[in-house]
Amino acid sequence: MSQTMDNLREAFAGESQAHTKYRYFAKIAREEGHEDIAKHFEHTSDQEILHSWSHLELVIGKPTTKECLEMAIAGETEEFTHMYPRMATAALNEGDDFSFQTAQEQIEESKEHAAQFQAILDKAQKRFSALSKIEKRHAAAYQQILEKL
């Protein structure tokens, strides 16, 4: 892995976190009655997500929708098989019941997300498979006509 790729991944993570933090800060400012400050946080957050996307595209390229679904499934699976179980174990070892419960809930939610993405991918693959068969029939019919010419 190159230093540039490491830097791009770090920039992606930083910009993504800034986006989320600023959205959260906007929520707090709005709850406290500071609409002008909330809007500023939201405006900056919108810029941060654009920065994040540009870094991500340099890291992963421009994948197809199918590839995006596959990456989403892999990411959610990583969360429920490794990330949140590690978090739950650490919280349990430290006696942090709230964090343990949160991790357990996130494991279940990540499983649901992975299953939802998988169902979408399966449905799309069936649809594309059917379209492919139709396209092949059309191509064969056109080829027969061309051969007669």
Image (cartoon, rainbow, N blue to C red):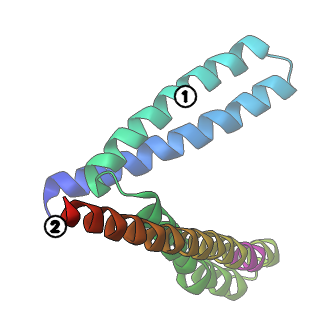
Mark 2–mark 1 CB contact (< 8 Å): no
Q: Which residue is drawn at 52% across and 39% down?
A: 18
Measured as percent of width and height from the top left, residue 33 is found at 86, 18
Which residue type does callout 2 highlight?
Answer: Met
Task: Determine the CA span between mark 2 and mark 1.
Answer: 30 Å
Q: Is mark 1 on a helix, strand or loop?
A: helix
Indicate yes or no whether the magenta region holds residue 106: yes
Measured as percent of width and height from the top left, residue 120 is found at 63, 69
Q: Which of marks 2 and 1 is nearer the N terminus?
A: 2
- Left or right of 33 on screen, residue 15: left
Q: Which residue is drawn at 32% across and 54% down?
A: 9
Which residue type does callout 1 highlight?
Answer: Asp
Highlighted magenta segment, given as a residue range: 103-109
Q: In which quarter of the image is the N terminus?
A: bottom left
Q: Which residue position holds label 1?
A: 46
- Left or right of 149 on screen, residue 51: right
Q: What element carries label 2?
A: loop
Q: Residue at x 40, y 64 (%)?
A: 138
- Left or right of 63 on screen, residue 120: right
Q: Which residue position holds label 2?
A: 1
Q: Residues within 10 Å of mark 2 (few under 14, many from 20)?
A: few
- Compared with residue 73, is residue 95 higher up or lower down, i.e. above or below? below
**What label sits on residue 102 in the rendered view?**
none
- Left or right of 67 on screen, residue 97: right
Indicate yes or no whether the magenta region holds residue 61: no
In which image quadrant can residue 89 be found? bottom right
Q: In which quarter of the image is the C terminus?
A: bottom left
- Compared with residue 10, is residue 97 higher up or lower down, i.e. above or below? below
Q: Which residue is drawn at 62% across and 75% down?
A: 114
Q: Residues within 10 Å of mark 1 (few under 14, many from 20)?
A: some
